[in-house]
Image (cartoon, rainbow, N blue to C red):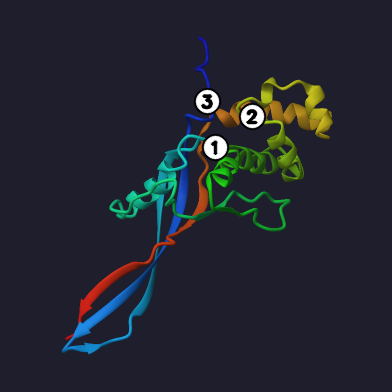
Amino acid sequence: MSSPSPIHSSERPHAFAVVLAVYSTIKKKGNGRGFPPKEGKSVKMKEILIVVNDGNYIKFPKSILEKHGYDNYRVSEKKCYLFKFVPPQTKSQGASNAMDIDNEVDYQEMVKKPHLSCFLSYTETNLSVLNTSMYEKDLELQGIGPDILADIDDKTHTLISFSTRDIIHLKKGSLVWWNGPEAKLKQRNAAVLSQSIEQTSDSG
């Protein structure tokens, strides 16, 4: 019996834990007297499952807003809400490798991160391949992710400075990881609305 064909990276949905901060300006009115506006902030976290690829730069923030009940806000190329992406942290990383997603170029860089970062974290924890995060940039530059890693020739891996032992573990591990539940490991992101929300409340 043949094994099922792996899902292409551009079609596989990712689970995101999204933190959305909403800043609001509340204007009070009553008895003809003017009251200074009051600023407020609310923070909510929800999980979404969404396909991440180069073609859904607008859909991504729109999905975040809809999930939080803000589907009345319009998202376009000229008005796309900013957010921060925080990939999973491997044991060898001293600090979080957070990215500010301010435009489409930033988003396309983010698209490369989720699967590769998750897989490298998995290899350190489960396959005893040390310091894999050191080679994340090299793998990204060559377009190598866990979906095709097993098909890359050993010479390319050696150029990235992986040992023969690590190459064997990475190749075998990528097939298991890519076709298993670990490929849907959650990412944590933060989205902050740059648009203020005006609300009016009656004073008693």
Expressed as whole percent of the image width and height from the top left, the position of residue 18 reads: 45, 53
What is the C-alpha distance between the residues marked 2 and 3? 14 Å
Callout 2 secondary element:
helix
Compare marks 3 and 1 and give the one earlier in the sequence: 3
Do the residues bearing badges 3 and 1 touch, measured as CB atoms within 8 Å? no
Sequence-wise, the earlier of marks 2 and 1 is 2
Kindly indicate the quadrant of the structure image that contains residue 69: bottom left
Residue 29 left/right relative to 193:
left
The amino acid at mark 1 is Glu
Going by the numbered disc 3, the residue's amino acid type is: His
Q: Position of residue 137 (x, y in %)?
A: 72, 41
Q: Tell which of 103 and 119 is nearer to you.
A: 103
Query: Considering only vertical position in the picture, is 179 above or below 94?
Result: above
Residue at x 70% of width, y 51% of height:
91
Residue highlighted by disc 2: 174
Residue 8 drawn above or below residue 52: above
Residue 148 or 80: which is nearer the viewer?
Answer: 80
Q: Is residue 41 left or right of residue 148?
A: left
Quadrant where the C terminus is found in the figure = bottom left
Q: Earlier in the sequence, mark 2 or mark 3?
A: 3
x 39%, y 50%: residue: 64
Q: Which mark is residue 182?
A: 1
Q: Nearer the viewer, mark 2 or mark 3?
A: 3
Residue 33 occupies quadrant: bottom left
At mark 3, the secondary structure is: loop
Q: Residues within 10 Å of mark 1 (few under 14, many from 20)?
A: some
Read off the residue under disc 3.
Answer: 8
Is 140 left, or right, of 158 in this rendering? left
Secondary structure of the residue carrying tag 1 is helix
The 10 Å Cα crowd at callout 2, few under 14, some 14 to 19, many 20 or more, is many
Percent coordinates x, y for residue 148 in the rendering = 64, 25
Check the image and report above or below for 76 versus 119: below
